[in-house]
Image: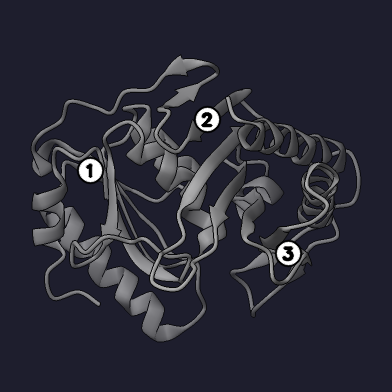
């Protein structure tokens, strides 16, 4: 395990400790929009704990880009993408499907694209720690992960989800869900992109599609999934290699061509 991954593990666990502590107090729920995107005291405390661990280990040359704000060296060669509580709505309602996600990417330089080199997703409810180094494979609590053997979309369990108050985005999600329900074995909406990607890596799910995903939502899960042979691309099948917001489709790899074909015409 590289030093970077060790720090990512420590940071994720520190964030999770804050989530556990906050459950015993007033969550102080605020809303980023009219009703769908909420933030709690736990999100903020978790991000601060994660930031403290990372910048304590790497006081220069590293930046934090998190769902609850940025910190560190703005001209850094390395950026940590942090979701301190992925699945905030689930957490606030006591639904046990949420996690902490921490990923480290190198910055793009000239014609060289940046890449994610370490990723950790920690599920504190089940004490499951998913971790990956670039080129080093991915593990769950130290054991190698394996995607499902499903090779047909009509036998696959697929996740499609959205969180929006925008009528156009709600309509787009409706079309996506309808399309997938017409071709897949089953469709679910779980509320945590990072944990969903790890569930595909662990063979518990087979595919996932969602619009407008930020790097803090998916960077760690994408690396973990790809390290075990799964795939995450844009809706049209092109690779997703940047930290830009994107519409993404992920799978166990076996059904990816069929999944992308089923999404044709959606945007």
Image quadrant for the C terminus?
bottom left
Asked whether 43 or 188 is in front, the reply is 43
Dot 2 corresponds to which residue? 130
Q: Residue furthest front?
A: 110
- Residue 44 place in picture, x, y as percent: 81, 57
Upstream in sequence: badge 3 or badge 1: 3
In the depicted structure, whether residue 26 falls above or below residue 121: below
Element type where label 1 sits in the image = strand
In the depicted structure, whether residue 213 falls above or below residue 165: above
- Residue 27 place in picture, x, y as percent: 84, 53
Residue found 16% across the figure and 41% down from its top: 185
Residue found 57% across the figure and 37% down from its top: 120
Upstream in sequence: badge 2 or badge 1: 2
Residue found 68% across the figure and 64% down from its top: 76
Residue 192: in sight, yes or no? no
Asked whether 207 or 102 is in front, the reply is 102
Asked whether 236 or 110 is in front, the reply is 110
Upstream in sequence: badge 2 or badge 3: 3
- C-alpha distance separating marks 3 and 1: 33 Å
Residue found 53% across the figure and 31% down from its top: 131
Question: In this image, 64 relative to 98: left or right?
Answer: right
Nearer to us of marks 2 and 1 is 2
Q: Quadrant of residue 70?
A: bottom right
Dot 3 corresponds to which residue? 68
At label 1, counting other C-alpha atoms closer than 10 Å, the crowd grade (few under 14, some 14-19, many 20 or more) is some
Image quadrant for the N terminus?
top right
At label 2, counting other C-alpha atoms closer than 10 Å, the crowd grade (few under 14, some 14-19, many 20 or more) is many
Question: In this image, 112 relative to 117: left or right?
Answer: left
Q: Residue furthest top?
A: 143
- Residue 251 place in picture, x, y as percent: 25, 44
Dot 1 corresponds to which residue? 186
């Amino acid at each position: 395990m590289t030093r970077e991954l060790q720090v990512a593990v420590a940071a994720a666990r520190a964030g999770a400790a804050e989530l556990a502590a906050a459950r015993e107090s007033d969550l102080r729920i605020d809303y980023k929009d009219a009703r769908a995107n909420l933030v709690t005291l736990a999100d903020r405390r978790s991000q601060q704990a994660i930031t403290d661990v990372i910048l304590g280990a790497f006081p220069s040359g590293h930046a934090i880009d998190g769902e609850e704000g940025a910190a560190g060296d703005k001209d850094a060669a390395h950026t940590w993408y942090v979701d301190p509580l992925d699945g905030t709505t689930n957490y606030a309602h006591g639904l046990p499907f949420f996690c902490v996600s921490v990923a480290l990417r190198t910055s793009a330089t000239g014609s060289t694209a940046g890449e994610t080199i370490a990723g950790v997703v920690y599920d504190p409810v089940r004490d499951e720690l998913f971790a990956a180094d670039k080129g080093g494979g991915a593990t769950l609590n130290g054991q190698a992960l394996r995607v499902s053997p499903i090779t047909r979309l009509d036998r696959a369990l697929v996740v499609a989800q959205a969180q929006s108050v925008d009528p156009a985005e709600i309509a787009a999600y409706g079309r996506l869900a309808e399309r997938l329900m017409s071709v897949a074995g089953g469709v679910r909406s779980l509320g945590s992109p990072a944990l969903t990607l790890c569930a595909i890596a662990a063979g518990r799910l087979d595919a996932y599609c969602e619009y407008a995903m930020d790097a803090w939502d998916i960077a760690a899960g994408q690396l973990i999934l790809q390290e075990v042979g799964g795939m995450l691309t844009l809706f049209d099948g092109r690779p997703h290699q940047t930290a830009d917001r994107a519409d993404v489709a992920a799978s166990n790899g076996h059904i990816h061509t069929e999944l992308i074909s089923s999404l044709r015409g959606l945007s």
